[in-house]
Image (cartoon, rainbow, N blue to C red):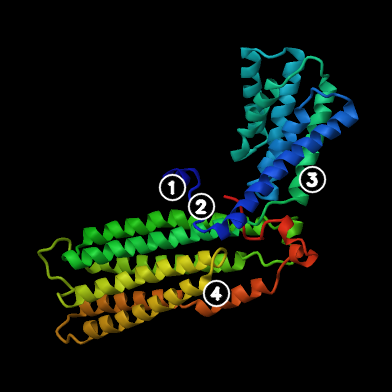
Amino acid sequence: MRFLDWAWPGHPTRWRDLPRRLRPRLVEIARLTSASVVAFVLVYGLTGQRQDLTGALTAMLVVQASTYSTIKMGIVRVGAVLTGVLVAVLLTNWFGLSWWSLGAAVAMSLTIARVLRLGDQMLEAPISAMLILAVHGSGVAVQTRVVSTLIGAAVGMTFGLLLAPAVPARKAAIEVRRAADEVGGLLRASAQSMRDRQVVRSDVEGWLDGTRQIGGQVAVASARVSEVKDSRRLNVWALGTSSGEATLRAGLDTVDGVLRAVAALYTVMARELPRDGTAEDPFDEAIRPAFAVVLDTMAESVHAFGMLLETEFEGDPAEVEEHFTRTLDNLRESRAILTELMLVDPAAGTEQWMLRGSVLSAVEQTLDQLDVLERVRQDREERLRRPGLVAVLGSADLRPRPFADTE
C-alpha cells in the first residue's frame, strides 16, 4: 500500500473508481503512440525513407506539448520543437554527431529560441535537437529530414486539435482547495494562539505575513482557472459543455475575499494591540476563548468550502454540502456569542470598541463571502444540463469526461 501511495499519489480507494481514473491516462498513451505511428507511416509513404524517425519524434513532442498547455502555448512549443529539430538536421547532415556538434546544436537552439522569445518553452528546442541527433542517419538527405519534421508537426497539431485533452477543471479545483486550506490553516494557528496566551502585535504581524504568502497560492490557482477557459478553445470535445470556469472563478474569488477579510482583521488587530504582554489586553479572559472559537469555525468553513468546490468536479458533493452547511451554522452561532460578549462591556474604552467593532465586521464579511451555497447549486444544475458533444454523439466511452483531466 505504501508503494502504491508513492507511485500514484491520490490513487482511487475504491475499485469502481479505477476505470474512470485510468481512462484519461490510457487515452493519453494512445494519443502519443498513434501520433508517432501515423507520422512514421506518412513520412514513409511520401519519402520512401524507412530509417528516418524525425517525423515520428516531432509528432510525439508536439502532441506532448499541446497536451499540457493551451492551444496558444502549444503553438509556441511547436516553434520550439521545430527550431531544435531543424538545427539538429543541418548539423548532422553537414558534420555528423560529435561532442562539438552536440554543443553547437544546444547553443544554437537556445540562441534561436531566445530570439524567437519562446519563454518557458525555450528548453524544448535543445531537447528536440538532442533527440534528433541521437537518431541521425547518414543516408537521409536534409530535404527529407525537413519534410519529415513538417509532417510530424502537422500530425501533432492535428492530433492536438481533433483529439484534444480533457479540460483541466479538476486540477484547477484542487489548486483553489489548496488556497482555501492555507487560509484555514492560518486561522487555526491564530485561534490556538488566542487560547494559549495574550496576543501581542508581533504575533499578528506574523499572521499578516502568512496572508501575503497565501496570496501566492491564490495566484497559482488563478492561473489554473485561466487554463480551463483557454483549453476549451478549438477543443471540439468541449462543445456544448459548461467548462466550470465560471464556478471555479467564483469559488476562487470567494477564497480571495475571505483572505482579504482576514488580512483586514489582522491589520486592525496589529494597529490596536499592545507591543508586549505588559500592557492591557483588549481581549479579556472571557472574550479570548470565544474569539478563538470563531476563528476555528471560520477555518472549518473555509476548508469545507474548498472541499465542496473540489467535489463539484469529482465526487459526490451532497455529503460535503451538508458538512459545509453545518460549518456555516456553527460560524453564525459562534459569531452571535462573540458579539454578545464584546458589546455588553460598558467599561470598554473607545479604542476597545473600535477594535471589537472591526473584529465583528471582519467576521461578518467572511460569513457573507462564504454564503454561496445557492450559487454553487445553480452552477451544478447548469453543468448537468449541458452534457456536451460526446454525450450527444452517444460515444462517451471514447473520450474522458470533460472534467476528468489527467494528473
Q: Amino acid at mark 1?
A: Met
Question: Are the residues tagged 4 and 3 within 8 Å (C-beta)?
Answer: no
Judging depth in this view, the residue of 81 and 199 nearest the camera is 81
Kind of element beneath mark 1: loop
Alpha-carbon span between mark 4 and mark 3: 36 Å
Which residue shows up at 67% across the image and 41% down it?
A: 64
| x then y, percent, for residue 253 | 50, 67
Label drawn at residue 376: 4
Label 4 vs label 2, nearer the camera? 2
Alpha-carbon span between mark 2 and mark 3: 32 Å
Alpha-carbon span between mark 4 and mark 2: 27 Å
Check disc 3 and report the residue beneath it: 158
* Circle 1 residues within 10 Å: few <14, some 14–19, many ≥20: few
Q: Earlier in the sequence, mark 2 or mark 3?
A: 2
Q: Earlier in the sequence, mark 3 or mark 1?
A: 1
Q: Amino acid at mark 4?
A: Val
Say if residue 73 shows up in the picture: no
Label drawn at residue 1: 1
Q: Amino acid at mark 3?
A: Thr
Check disc 2 and report the residue beneath it: 11
Alpha-carbon span between mark 1 and mark 4: 36 Å
> Which quadrant would residue 154 be assigned to in this image?
top right
Q: Amino acid at mark 2?
A: His
